Every structure is written in structure tokens, then in C-alpha cells.
Image (cartoon, helix red, strand yellow):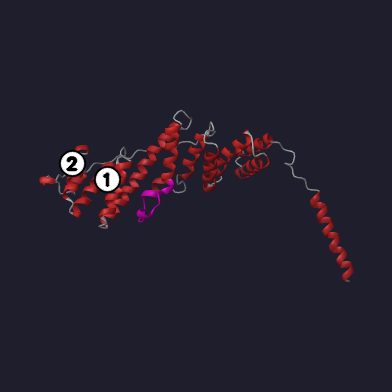
Amino acid sequence: MRFPLFWNVLLVGAMLITGCAGIKNPTKDWDAKRFYDEAQQAMADGKYDLAITRFEDLEARFPYGRYAQQAQLEIIYAYFKNTQGPLAIEAADRFIRLHPTHPHVAYAYYLKGLVNVPRRHGLAKYLNTGDDIQRRDPKSVEEAYLAFKEVVERFPDSHYARDASRRIAYLSNEIAKHEINVARFYLNEDAYVAAVNRSKFVLENFQSTPSVEDALGIQAMAYQRMGLTELMRGTVQVLELNFPNSEYFEDINAPEGKKKKRKKKKKKKKKKKEGSIINY
């Protein structure tokens, strides 16, 4: 009984081998252009997994030439659309490193900025809501800010500079608000040095944002509570000069008994439109 069983197994194995040998690789005879065109079609159809595969195959089979460079660039967007953020950032950094003078390197920086902005729950909600704001890590948002800044400063005439500039303004406001929220948390926890440091960060890096008033007010209160009178007075003078009606005068023992009570300003919230992604 063992002998026929052996031959049956051998026969089945031979049939499997023969069948596998008959399967042909459909891309075997493709040139670089065919890979690129197929990847583009997959992108247009929303088949980002397939597009990524085609771009990867193109670079593996034809690592040199303009199609390989285009694949390296456009796979960034494919990863982004396929919600593979870390791979998109890695691909963007790789392209920037390999092709720093490429005519469309601005696009790589721009996409790197888009990928780094938290999208799942919204940036403002991620940074500035909840009971654990001080633990939120704004690193990716800061990376986005720096990427967009590269676009604006190094490629001001590119297609992406205008949108990047708008995004910088938005990111600046949100990062500054986050730092102020953390500074206020430290102030309430009697961690005055930390509160001052967070406020200084805003004053040094985000001077054009509405959070400057908060930074000066919190800094002045922290100095006051630490008994650093001269530093507090200097900060109050700057606050008076730039924000004479600041609500923070209600909480600060101003010099020479000038404790001012001002009507709290109502801040109008402006709706911010989410810019469309600019395709290359």
C-alpha cells in the first residue's frame, strides 16, 4: 500500500510544479513607461495599494532615469492617500535627500507638511482640547510647520507656496495656543519657571499670533508669584504698550498700584477652510 501512495504524492507534486511553471508574470515585458502609466491609472482609480506596488516595481526594475525619479516623488502622495503616513514621510525625506535640486522638490516638502498634520480628529482638537493638553506632543505639527516654511522660503514661486503660507499661519496659531494652554496649566500648578519658559517660546517664535497677549500675561503673573518684581514690571510695560486693554491687568498687581480692571474682550472665532491638496 505504501508504494502506490508514494507515486500518487509524487504525481500530485509534479502536477503542481508544472502548473506553477505555466504562470507568467504579466509585467515581465513592461518597460519603465508602462509601469509608470499603470501606476498613474491606479492612482486615478483610487487603487493606492496597486499604485504603490507599480511605483515600487518600476524603481526596482528601472532604478535610473526620469521615470524612476517620478516614481520616487509620486509614491509619497500614494502613501499619503493610503493612510501610510510614516512611509510617506520616509519617502519624502528620501526624495529630498537624493534630489535636492529637482524641479519639483517643493512638492516633496509640501506633501511632507500635509502628512505631518494630524487629520484623524483635527489639529485644533488634538492639540488644544481635553484634560491632558500638557502631555500632547506637537512634534509632528512642528515638523509640518518647518516643511511648509521650506516651501515658502526656498520656493516662493512654486505652485504650493501660497497654500503653504496659509497653512503656516494656521499651524502657528494652533502651536502657539497649545503652548499657552500648557503654560497656563503650569501656572495653575505653581510651576512658574515652566510657565515662563512656555510663554517665552511663544514670544520668541510666534510673535504674529494672537497668543502673544496671553504669553505676556502669563509670564507677568509667573514673575509676580516668584517675587521677581523687576522682571514682572518689564513684562507689564510691554503688555501695556501692546495690549492696553488686556484682561490680564485684572490678575496682575501692576507697578505703582495701577491694577486695572478691564472688560473682557470677546474673541470672534473665524471659520478656517481646509485647503485642497494640490496634485502634481
Q: Is residue 138 magenta?
A: yes
Q: Residue at x 62, y 33 (%)?
A: 66
Residue 130 pos. (x, y %): 36, 54
Name the quadrant containing residue 41.
top right
For mark 2, does the 10 Å Cα neighbourhood hold few (<14), some (14 to 19), or many (20 or more) residues? Answer: some
Extreme-top residue of the structure: 157
Observer-nearest residue: 149 or 24?
A: 149
Observer-nearest residue: 194 or 211?
A: 194
Q: Read off the magenta span.
A: 126-140
Q: Quadrant of the C terminus?
A: top right
Position of 221 relative to 166 (above/below): below
- Spatial CA span between label 2 and label 1: 14 Å
Residue 16 pos. (x, y %): 81, 56
User: From this viewpoint, is residue 197 visible?
Assistant: yes
Circle 2 — which element? helix
The amino acid at mark 1 is: Ala
Name the quadrant containing residue 154.
top left
> Is 20 displayed left or right of 178 in the figure?
right
Position of 255 relative to 70 (above/below): below
User: From this viewpoint, is residue 163 visible?
Assistant: no
Q: Quadrant of the N terminus?
A: bottom right
Residue 143 pos. (x, y %): 43, 44
Extreme-bottom residue of the structure: 1
Residue occupied by mark 2? 237
Residue occupied by mark 1? 215
The amino acid at mark 2 is: Gln
Q: Residue at x 52, y 48 (%)?
A: 86
For mark 1, does the 10 Å Cα neighbourhood hold few (<14), some (14 to 19), or many (20 or more) residues? Answer: many
Label located before the other in sequence (2 or 1): 1
Q: Is residue 254 magenta?
A: no
> Is 64 displayed left or right of 238 in the figure?
right
Circle 1 — which element? helix
